[in-house]
Image: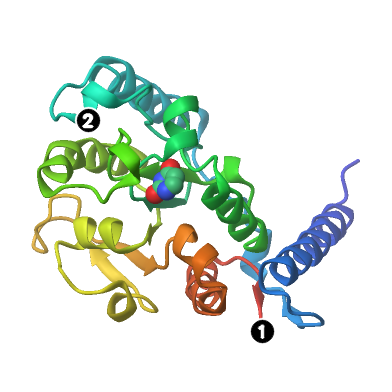
Amino acid sequence: MNDGGGEFESRKRSAVLGALAQQLASDRLLGVREVPFVLSEAAFRPVGALCVADVADKSGALVRLDRERVQGCRACSLCETRTNTVFGSGSSAARLVFVGEAPGFHEDKQGKPFVGRAGDLLTKMTDAMGLRRDDVYICNVLKCRPPNNRDPAPDEIVACSAYLLEQLSIIQPEVIVALGAPAARTLLNTSDSIGRLRGRFHDFHVSGKPTSGSPTPLMPTYHPAYLLRNPAEKRKAWADLQIVMKLLGLPTVR
Ligand code: URA
């Protein structure tokens, strides 16, 4: 017979182990040791609370969007120079979506987002949050690589951002993290700097209109590529991610 107490103990044990793993991962990210952590009740909640049919619908809708519209897209000149479109990866049932800027060299070759050095750091960031990359969804504002990794041009953002908005409206995450200024500015329709935007939630509306529907909290933070060049700023990015973790009820580091 299944005794509820035993099950609770075993879930608690795995949550403690998960929190310890998260502690080690955040130590690795920041080079900090011996930081105490707290476990909240919400840590025992499963990450995806959707039923099988919802997940299948969302994943089918994402696959259709990618195959039928993005892979053959010729809406801007980046289609001439791309090797592959880079749609997104991760769980269609994700509670958390990371949005980056645009594919780089490795992403263009492999057709997957964040697989280069910045991607390795993003993996460390999700590890530190106690999440696997498969638990979250990762995509970019642009689905094609700008030549020589130059900044996305305004007309490219206009041409491509409809795909991003559609991805977000299919997934309906509980929270979005915008990695870097182009993602934050595109989603929040602002020209503010990332330094001014980061550190607090902003309301994201898929429609772009504050009057329609309920907003999704969006946390802007520094892009992993920027953090590789400016490691001292990792601490601020980690503080931003901890705010996100609190909202998701994930165990946080004190
Ligand atoms: N930088 C991004 O913004 N996206 C990627 O997929 C890789 C690097």
Instruction: From the viewer's side, name the closer residue of 251 and 195.
Output: 195
For image coordinates 91% across by 40% down, the residue present is 1
CB atoms of marks 2 and 1 within 8 Å = no
Cα gap from disc 2 to disc 1, whole angstroms: 44 Å
User: What element does badge 2 sit on?
Assistant: helix
User: What element does badge 1 sit on?
Assistant: loop
Quarter occupied by residue 32 = bottom right
Please name the colour scheme applied to the rendered image.
rainbow
Instruction: From the viewer's side, name the closer residue of 234 and 44.
Output: 234
Question: Which of the two discs, 2 and 1, sits closer to the camera?
Answer: 2
In this view, 254 is above or below 54: below
Q: Residues within 10 Å of mark 1 (few under 14, many from 20)?
A: few
Three-letter code for the amino acid on which mark 1 is drawn: Arg
Q: Position of residue 152 (x, y in %)?
A: 23, 47
Mark 1 = which residue? Answer: 254
Q: Position of residue 247 (x, y in %)?
A: 48, 69
Quarter occupied by residue 187 = bottom left
Position of residue 54 in the picture relative to residue 228 (left or right): left
Mark 2 = which residue? Answer: 78
Position of residue 16 in the picture relative to residue 105 (left or right): right
In this view, 123 is above or below 254: above
The answer to which of marks 2 and 1 sits earlier in the sequence is 2
For image coordinates 62% across by 51% down, the residue present is 46
Instruction: From the viewer's side, name the closer residue of 83 and 185.
Output: 83
